[in-house]
Image (cartoon, rainbow, N blue to C red):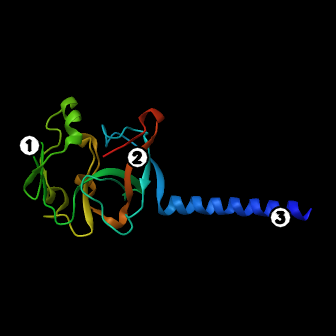
Amino acid sequence: MEMAKSESWEWVKAVAVALILAVVIRYFFFAPIVVDGQSMMPTLEHNDRMIVNKIGYNISEPDRFDIIVFHAPQNKDYIKRVIGLPGDQIRYEEDMLYINDEPVEEPYLEDYKQEADQMPFTGDFTLSEVTGYDSVPEGHVFVLGDNRQHSKDSRHIGVIPYDEVVGKANFVFWPVQEVRLVD
């Protein structure tokens, strides 16, 4: 009888440790997210399931062109691409991105631009016109959705503070036939 009690107790401890580990991993390291909407097409599709990598985002800043998840207005999480880093001057002119007055290619948009119904794919703007800042402030990023004509992003909600960034999203795990890393 004593041996059965001991074995049961070991199972309870093992399950408790597994649950604690699962919570710690989900809260501090990785979390699932569902893409809601078409703002990141063609890179990400509506209802894609992704893993958000939280490692390092609590202590460092995102890199240019990372796809990140962040807390947005209305208690919602958004997924967008980092375009501008602190100190960057951003503008779009004749469908070309300029960062600090240098043209920057966006190869992830090329196929979608060719299929777009309207041109220009990304309308002209300056950072100052859409955010009121001449350059991206320290501790913030400027983000855009890849589907520029149908995206609520920094042009509408402003620059994103680092402390609102949840993590980097670069692995689609569902649907199974679409499992892939994204850039």
Name the image quarter holding residue 95.
top left
The disc label shown at residue 171, or none:
2
* Residue 117 shows in this picture: no
The disc label shown at residue 6, or none:
3
Tell me the residue that label 1 is attached to: 94
User: Relative to the observer, which residue lies in front, 54 or 74?
Assistant: 54
Q: Give SS at disc 3.
A: helix
Give x and y (percent) for residue 97: 13, 49
Q: Earlier in the sequence, mark 2 or mark 1?
A: 1
Give me the C-alpha separation between circle 1 and circle 3: 73 Å
Task: Name which residue lies at 10% across and 59% down.
Answer: 100
Picture mark count: 3
Task: Name which residue lies at 38% across and 64% down.
Answer: 56
Which label lies toward us, 2 or 1?
2
User: Relative to the observer, which residue lies in front, 2 or 155?
Assistant: 2
Task: Name which residue lies at 19% across and 64% down.
Answer: 136
Q: Is residue 52 left or right of residue 125?
A: right
Where is 149 relative to 15, above or below? above
